[in-house]
Structure formats: structure tokens, C-alpha cells
Amino acid sequence: MKRTLIVLIMMFFVVSMSCLASNIPNPDTVIELTTGTVPTLDPSWSYDTRSGEIIFQTYDNLIQYDGTSITRFLPMLSTNVPSKKEGTILDNGKTYIFHIRKNVHFHNGDMLTPEDVVYSLERTIVLDRSGGPQWMLDEPLLPKINGAYVDDIKSWAVKLAGVKSWSDLFIKGTKTPKNDKYKQALINTFELLDKDFEIKGDDVIIHLPHVYAPFLFILAHGANWSVVMDKKWAIDNGAWPGTANTWWLYNSPTREKDPLYSIENGSGPFIVDHWIKGREVVLKRFDNYWAGKAKIHYAIIKRVDEFTTRKLMLEKGDADLISVPDQYIQQVESIPGVKVFKNLPALHMDALIMNFNVQGKDNPYIGSGKLDGNGIPPDFFSDINVRKAFSYMFPYQKFIKEAAMGYGIQPNGPIPKGMLGYNPNGPRYKFDLAKATEYFKKAFNGKLWKVGFKMTIGYISGEEPIAGEMLAYYAKKINPKFKIKYQGFLWASFLPAFEEGKLPMYFAGWVADYPGPNDFVQPFLGSNGAYSGSSGKNFKKLAVEKFDPLINKAMEETNPEKRAQYYYELQKICYEEAVNIWELQPLGVHVQRSWIHGWYYNPMRPGFPPSNSADFFRIWKSSN
């Protein structure tokens, strides 16, 4: 009798649990809905949050953030977090020792080795694609030139060869060095990098040429440029073979010609099961993951640009996590079984970038390409009066209220509030149409006011075009001859338009690569920054003269108070020169079904927006 009773109880328990699970759609699968598309699966090429989210789930780094913290680390592929206390940070902060974890499988079955770590970091620097993330490894790992940090490996090749530009090294139209001297300079350039690395048994020892305070942040999980990949697999698939005498052949490939563009072989908890470009990425659990199996079997990230569709799928239970623009938050709060996390502190900056020198040939975004009322000249934003006019024409508080539903603050430069270098008393532009009119009348010696202009502002499809609508409305109100069109782009279309410098003005968001001010001032203000580096020769001239010296001084300064003063000065100059329109520092919102458990917020986890993303390894679905 007792035995029969126990069996019946167990059967009842199993049936009950099955019933509970059946109330949750797809209990072993988490479905996330977002906007935009994934450009690449190659960690060394990727520099966007959409690719970064996939790479976060499929590749591992040496170390990782400790849960929600952005200042504490835990081991990952390294079994230690280097520290002075344990004797693994030496030479006053220039030497780091990592003990590489054993018995780690890549997805194809290969085993992790210390050589994979060195290859991965070197490959990112060698790849050095235009507008890419390489600068974050270049600066700590390459020696300075004339006291300035180096942001691309090509700079050292040019210096050692004694030429003026990278193209001077090669026979025109090829990647063949012109002579043995130039070839040797290229080889010597790689050797400057390679001598930073030493392998002793299972240890990787990194010798920096100079102290670089944020180095560990640059290596932490979420930084796709420093993930560890399988050297053998990468070479077998046509990537750089790890040799000093060929590295330039693999430098700066286009996205589609990058051999690892659409394939993946990380050591992370999920494998890319399939990628339908422009639509979805399906991740499958990797059962040989060194830290154990994930609790879910599949994670699906779908592109659904329309919010109404995302909302309906959330209501029906066909989606577990969705991206929600701030203006629609109230609509999802009232849905039964939905949980909303609000006011999440975001290390995030939104800006409208003004391109000082637009690429003018065959460019539909600048109309006629002339100051004739039917377009704008390529150097339209090189006129400081134009930049100041636009800065005064933007309705900051109205934008925050209507576009972000009040979930944000108006920045006074590129550094977010809450970070070293943010100056609460720093000057900022205010909405003032009289001032905007004043500066428009001064622009181009008064000709702009008389003839008017016509231009296109770019933004990513799926995002709200409110900023462009507002500028278009107020420009026309100031002068009917001022005509602004705002155009949505698919992410894959936006990237080439941006990289080719064709967009005169575009919306740009920057999510922290690591939690430090240099990560914001460099991409927005540095002469080779991710955004500023594509803002034309006139901006580059301004940056070399006024921004780069202060950026470098701030990085060299170890006293926090003195560092902050350099950043205050940077932002003051930024205001005086009216560089970009600093729209918004948002506060994050996360929306999910209440059956999702284990979600936590860390602003350093990539995704779009970051508050929408999840660490799929640590979440599960349950009715409890």
C-alpha cells in the first residue's frame, strides 16, 4: 500500500508540474523581440550592440563582471582576476598575469589553450577595420607615438617606414609592399605588438608598454573585441594565420569579405543554431559549457520593428522580453503577467552628429550639394554658426518629455552623469529659436538665410524619428526655406552610409564599452573616434588641435580630481564649438513576462537597448 501511495503521489506531482509548465508557452525557450538587424558574428569586426548581444551569449572573455556590479570582476576563462594583492599585477600596473582555465571546450570540440588568448587579442588589432573597436586594445598594447596614444596599428607602420600615409607603403591598388624596407617596417610593427605577450605554461602574461588604468574593463565579458576565439578554427576558415609577415593582408576587410562574418565557434553557453539575416538569430544550448548547462534550451532574438506587433506578441505569450520605447511604457504596464523594471541607470549617450565634411559625390542626402536652396554644400556643418543654430533649435526638454516620457536627463557633453568627469555645472544649450535665427542669419555670410537649404537626417528604422521631426518642424517655422527630411534606415544600410560619410546629420547612441569617461570622449571627440573619425577633415583638424591633447592628458593622470578637470575642459570646448547636439542620457526600462526569472541588470551587457538584453545563461521560465 505504501509503495502504491508513493507512486500515485509522484504521478500526481509530475502531472501537476506538467500542467503548470503547459501554462507557459515554450517553457524551454526564451524569445526576445527587438529592432534592427545583426551585422556580423565576428567579435573582432563587431562594434554594435546587436551583434554584441549574440557574441555575449556565444563567446567568453578572460574575466566577467560580478552580477550587477560595474566595478567588481569574477574569473571567466582566466581562473583569476589579476590584482596587486595576489601578485598578478606587477611593474606598477604594466604587467598582468592570467591563469588560463583548463578543460574548456569550443563549440566544435577544440580545447582552449593560452595561444588562443594571444591570437584573439592580436587578431582584433590586426583586423583594425574602419570605425571599429580596435582602439581600445591599441591604446594599452601599442607604444605611444610622440607622447600620444595610438588608435590603430597602421600608425606605427607609417612611422617605422618613414612615409606619410598607409597607402604609401603599397603598390597602388594592392596590399603588396613597394619594397623590402617597407615590408620590414610592417613586420617590425607587428613585433612591437607581439612582444607584449608571453606564455608560461598555462599562464598568459601581458606586458603593457605604459600604464593604462581601464585595461581590465577592456578585457571583461561584454567587450566583444577581447573575447577568446579558437585560433585553429579561425585560421582553417581563412582568418589571419597569426604570422608577422602577412598581417597587413588581413587588415580592414569589408564586412562581407571578413571570413568569420557569418560563422561562430565560441566557448560560451550557447551556439548559433541559425541566423536568418535581417530577421532572427536562434541560439541553442551548448551542453559542454565549462560552467555547466544553461537552464533553457533555446534563446531566439527576433527583429520586430513595429511596437504594436511586439506588444501583441508579449500579451499573447509569444514573446518573453521586448524592447519598449519610453512613450509606450504605460501600455505594457497594464498587461496582466508583465513585469516592468524602470529607472535603470544607463551608461548611455544619445546625440545628433553633425558631419563637418559630407562625402558629396552621388549623395542623395545633401540634395544638389550646393547652397542654392535645393541642398547643402558638403562643408555645411563646418560653419560654426550653422552648428550653433541647430544646437539652439533643438527642444531638449520637450524631446525628453515626449520621446523618453521623462526617463532621462539633458547632457552637457559626451560624459554621462554619474561618471568621473561629468560636470553638473557645465554649460549646455537651451531651446531658443531667437538665438537659432540669429546664428542662421550669420551662417555663410548671410547667404544661407536668403536661399535656404534642403537636407536629410538619418535614423535607425524601428526607433522613433521624433528628433528629426522636431528639427524639421522648427527649421520650417524659423524660415520656410529650411527643409529637413528624416529617413529611417535598416541597420545594415545605415552602417555603409555612415562609414562612407554620406549622412550630413544622424542620430547616434553610444553605450559604454567600459565604465570610464575616456570611452565616451574618445568616440565622440577624438580625431579617430568611432563617430568623430567619420566627421570629416575639418572636424579632425579641430580634434587634433583641441580635443586629442586633453584626452591624452586625462588618460595619463592618476589623480581623479585632476583627471576630472581635464574632462571639464574638454566639455567646455565641446560647448563652445557646438560639437554635436547632446540629446539625452536615458534611464533604462526592462519589460518581460513575469514567468521569466534570473534576469538582472548590468549596463555593460550589450543589447539594444542594454536594459532589454538578458544573460540567457542565468535565466529560466517558471510560473512560480
Image (cartoon, rainbow, N blue to C red):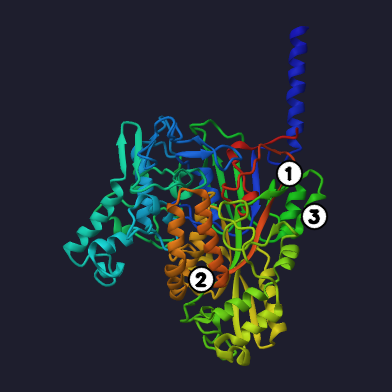
On residue 330, the disc is 3
Marks 1/3: CA–CA distance: 15 Å
Residue 524: horizontal and vertical position, in percent?
52, 63
Q: Position of residue 375 (x, y in %)?
A: 57, 86
- Residue 241, how many percent across, how many down? 30, 50
Image check: 309 left or right of 36? right
**First along the sequence among labels 3 and 2:** 3
Quarter of the rendering containing residue 487: bottom right
Asked if residue 111 can be seen in this view, the reply is no
Q: Is mark 2 on a helix, strand or loop?
A: helix
Q: What kind of residue is marked 3? A: Gln
Question: Residue at 75% across / 26% down in the picture?
Answer: 15
Q: What crowding class fits label 3: few (fewer than 14 Cα within 10 Å), some (14-19), or many (20 or more)?
A: few
**At label 1, which amino acid type do we have?**
Arg
> Which numbered marker is on residue 497?
2
The residue tagged with tag 1: helix, strand or loop? strand
In this view, the mark in front (1 or 3): 3
Residue located at (67% from left, 80% from top): 435
Circle nearer the N terminus (1, 2): 2
For this rendering, which residue is in front, 589 or 594?
A: 589
Name the residue tied to disc 1.
593
Q: Nearer the viewer, residue 247 or 490?
A: 247
Spatial separation of the CA atoms under disc 1 and disc 2: 37 Å
The kind of residue on which mark 2 rests is: Ala
What's the residue at 29%, 55% (across, down)?
A: 247
**Depth check: 223 or 487 in front?**
223
Tell me the residue at 76%/55% (across/down): 329
29 or 410, which lies in front?
410
